[in-house]
């Protein structure tokens, strides 16, 4: 420790968590899956609590369907969440909802961390790792190695091996410099690109996305059996 000479701190970034929660849960049967409970608490609240507790995140933008806005507002209060939260109406597709969320970010926001509301078990390490990498490289997303062998299949015929070390499963939060992701999303939507995630828009704009450490427990709740798996992970967390 040197006395009288302070180590220069990197400038504090302003980080927004944009949480798309405006889907229609078709693969779950149509009832809003984000209100289903894990450990007695709605999925949405698990997700919001992860960002409430993350010290790198300054505020939250929650994207909701019109009919869910009041429900989400009430839940936010009921569970004692207190970080600043901006609620906005979502769009027709996930990408439209994300764009609405990014547009609602406050002036001066440096980084947006875009996270599926349907991934309630995200950890602080995964969030912070992706935010730090986005600040350094412009864009970042957590990935995990594939466990299964992967094959290319055409017309019911297995054609070739896809080398496992060349692929990974991508998760959220996908984090970006705020100014760059807004333009990338607008361009991709204008070109009607089929976007499965936000990285795809960033990549299509020719911008690099850094891979960071994901977590096998950071699953997306998509179909009913995912609830069982998530419940097991949640119980395992506490022991
Ligand atoms: N999402 C959104 N706006 C949309 C579609 C999806 O905000 N128009 C959100 C969902 O609420 C979810 C996340 O994007 O948190 C990932 O989407 P997905 O898991 O596909 O959820 P749904 O679209 O609701 O489910 P499904 O595709 O089965 O209808
Ligand atoms: Mg969907």
Image: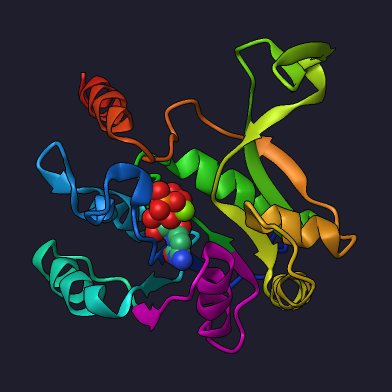
Relative to residue 56, is residue 179 depicted above or below?
A: below
Relative to residue 217, is residue 200 depicted above or below?
A: below
Query: Among all residues in the image, which is located at the extreme front?
Result: 155
Q: Residue at x 23, y 77 (%)?
A: 67
Q: If the image is split into quadrants, where does the C terminus sit?
A: top left
Using residue 218 as the reference point, say whether residue 147 is left or right of it: right
Relative to residue 91, is residue 235 depicted above or below?
A: above
Using residue 208 as the reference point, say whether residue 99 is left or right of it: left
Image spot of residue 181 (x, y percent)? 71, 70
- Picture quadrant of residue 150: top right
Q: Is residue 78 visible?
A: yes
Q: Residue at x 14, y 47 (%)?
A: 41
Image spot of residue 84 (x, y percent)? 34, 77
In the foreground, 190 or 145 = 190
Give the magenta part as a residue range: 85-112
Image spot of residue 49 (x, y percent)? 29, 54
In the foreground, 154 or 9 = 154
Q: Residue at x 22, y 70 (%)?
A: 72
Image spot of residue 111 (x, y percent)? 63, 68
């Amino acid at each position: 420790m040197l006395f009288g000479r302070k180590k220069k701190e990197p400038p504090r970034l302003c980080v927004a968590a944009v949480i798309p929660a405006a889907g229609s849960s078709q693969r779950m049967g149509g009832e809003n899956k984000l209100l289903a409970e894990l450990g007695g608490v709605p999925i949405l609240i698990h997700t919001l609590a992860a960002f409430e507790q993350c010290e790198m995140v300054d505020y939250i933008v929650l994207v909701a369907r019109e009919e869910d806005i009041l429900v989400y507002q009430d839940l936010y209060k009921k569970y004692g969440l207190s970080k600043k939260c901006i609620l906005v109406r979502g769009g027709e597709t996930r990408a439209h909802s994300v764009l609405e969320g990014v547009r609602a970010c406050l002036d001066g926001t440096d980084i947006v961390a875009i996270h599926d509301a349907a991934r309630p078990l995200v950890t602080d390490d995964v969030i912070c790792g992706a935010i730090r990498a986005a600040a350094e490289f412009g864009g970042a997303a957590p990935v995990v190695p594939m466990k299964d062998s992967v094959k290319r299949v055409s017309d019911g015929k297995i054609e070739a091996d896809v080398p496992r070390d060349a692929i990974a499963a991508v998760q959220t939060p996908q984090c970006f410099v705020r100014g760059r992701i807004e333009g990338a999303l607008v361009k991709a939507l204008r070109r009607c690109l089929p976007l499965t995630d936000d990285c795809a828009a960033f990549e299509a704009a020719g911008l690099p996305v850094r891979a960071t450490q994901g977590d096998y427990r950071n699953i997306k709740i998509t179909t009913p059996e995912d609830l069982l798996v998530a419940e097991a992970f949640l119980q395992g967390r506490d022991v």
